[in-house]
Image (spheres, rainbow, N blue to C red):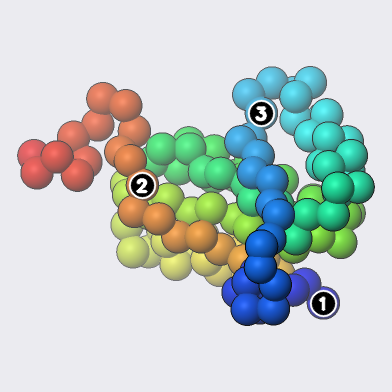
Amino acid sequence: MIRKIAEILNEKKPTLSFEFFPPKTEKGRAKLPETAAELKKLGPDWFAVTYGAGGSTREATTEIVDELQNKLDVPVMNHLTCVGHSQSELKEILDTLKKKNIVNILALKGDPPPGSRLGTGG
């Protein structure tokens, strides 16, 4: 059973977590689970995986969260940046997360992608 981070925060203070940005290279992507396994030895309460502006790393974020929480038995938080997504896209993303049993989600408004006029009133 995957623990919810909200429960951990209610039970324990302080907590320890590590945050990962999805690597930009295949080599980095291949190394990430190994790095997370080494960091697990330090006893983190959870890991978090960020989400690029406008969803630029959406698929990678979800793949990494799914892999880490299944391999390492550590709760993993999936960041979800909402800016630039329609309501139907957000529902689809949440449905995918639910199917993968990803229960720890940090939903943020987020920054628009570079060069975008989203959120600028224009």
Q: Position of residue 105 (x, y in %)?
A: 56, 63
Instruction: Work out whether mark 1 precedes mark 3 in sequence or the reverse, and give the earlier one.
Output: 1
Residue for point 18% across, 35% down:
117
Res 73 visible: yes
Pointer 1 with pointer 2, Cβ within 8 A: no
- Count residues near mark 1 (Cα–Cα under 10 Å), then give few for <14, some for 14-19, many for 20+: few
Label of residue 1 in the image = 1
Q: Gap between marks 1 and 3, in whole Å?
A: 27 Å
Asked which quadrant contains residue 61, the reply is top right
Q: What element carries label 1?
A: loop
Q: Which residue is drawn at 24% across and 31% down?
A: 116
Q: Mark 3 points at which residue?
A: 23
Q: Residue at x 62, y 66 (%)?
A: 104
Decide which of 114, 59 is in the foreground and name it.
114
State the residue at coordinates (82%, 77%).
1
In the displayed structure, would residue 75 be above or below residue 62?
Answer: below
Q: Position of residue 7 (x, y in %)?
A: 66, 78
- The circle drawn on residue 110 is 2
Residue flagged by tag 3: what amino acid is it?
Answer: Pro
Tell me: residue 66, above or below residue 35: below
Kind of residue indicated by mark 1: Met
Quadrant, the C terminus: top left
